[in-house]
Amino acid sequence: GNSVTQMEGPVTLSEEAFLTINCTYTATGYPSLFWYVQYPGEGLQLLLKATKADDKGSNKGFEATYRKETTSFHLEKGSVQVSDSAVYFCALLNQAGTALIFGKGTTLSVSS
Amino acid sequence: DVKVTQSSRYLVKRTGEKVFLECVQDMDHENMFWYRQDPGLGLRLIYFSYDVKMKEKGDIPEGYSVSREKKERFSLILESASTNQTSMYLCASSFRRMNTEAFFGQGTRLTVV
C-alpha cells in the first residue's frame, strides 16, 4: 500500500540555519508528492509540490526534489526564519487522484 | 481563492451525544476528505468521498459515519461521542485527478466530556 515516512521532530534551529526534513514514500505507480505546512491554530496549507520524477517544487525559499530512485522528497531551506516555525507534513497522492496519504508531521521551532 | 469552510472552530459535546461536523467547499471539487489530527499520530484519514452519495472508509472509520448529499457539502457524524474522539478534525477537498493538491479547512477542535 501507499505510505509516507518523515523524520520525527521536533527540529530546533537558530535563525539563518540550514533546514532539512527527510521524507520517503512507498507507492505503486507514479504518485504526486507534496509538502504542507500548518501554522499554530490554522489548517494545512500547500507549501510546494512535484508531480513527476526529478521535478523540483519550490516556494518561500523552500525546495524539494522528487527522487524516484531513492523514493524521497526531502524538504530544504537555506536560511530559516522565526516565522517558519510550524508543523510540516509530507504527503503523496496516488496516481488515480483519490488517496491522499500524510506522514506524521515534523515540528520545526526556530529561535532568534 | 478556494474556500473550504468548517462549521465550527471549537466544539464541546457530552459523551453519548450525536455530533455533526459540517464542511462546505466552493470549488466544485469531486473529492472530499475527513481527517483527524492527534499529537504524534499525524493526520489519519477517517472517510473520503469521490462523488455525491459515494463514500469510502479510510484508516480509522470506527465510530464515525459520513453523508454527502450535495457535491459541495460533506458531513462527519459521530453517532455516540466518546472521550477518545476528542481531537482536531480537518476537512479537505480536491479535484479527482492526478497531480492536484487538496485544500483544507481551518479545523474543528472537538472536546468530548
Image (spheres, rainbow, N blue to C red):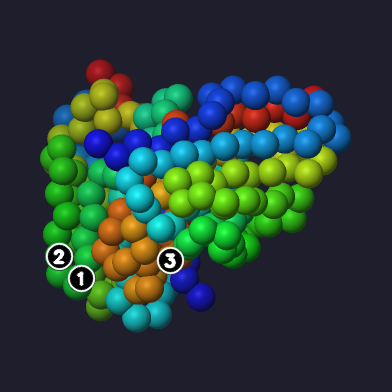
Of tags 3 and 1, which is closer to the observer?
3
In this rendering, position of residue B6 left or right of residue A93: right
- Please identify the quadrant where the C terminus of chain A is shown: top left
* Image mark for residue A108: none
Name the residue type under label 1. Lys
In this rendering, position of residue A102 left or right of residue A46: right
Of tags 3 and 2, which is closer to the observer?
3
Q: Secondary structure at mark 3?
A: loop
- Looking at the image, which is closer to me, A63 or B77? B77
Label 2 sits on residue? A55
Above or below for A91 versus A12: below
Name the residue type under label 3. Thr
The residue at 26%/23% (across/down) is A82
Q: Chain of mark 2?
A: A
- Looking at the image, which is closer to me, A44 or A64? A44
The residue at 46%/51% (across/down) is B71
Asked if the residues shown at circle 3 and circle 2 are in contact, with their CB atoms under 8 angstroms apart, the answer is no
Above or below for A29 versus B80: below
Name the residue type under label 2. Asp
Label 3 sits on residue? A98
Q: Is residue A42 visible?
A: yes
Q: Chain of mark 1?
A: A
Q: Position of residue A55 (x, y in %)?
A: 15, 65
Q: Position of residue A23 (x, y in %)?
A: 35, 58
Q: Report crowding for label 2: few under 14, some 14 to 19, many 20 or more residues within 10 A (C-alpha).
A: some
Label 1 sits on residue? A52
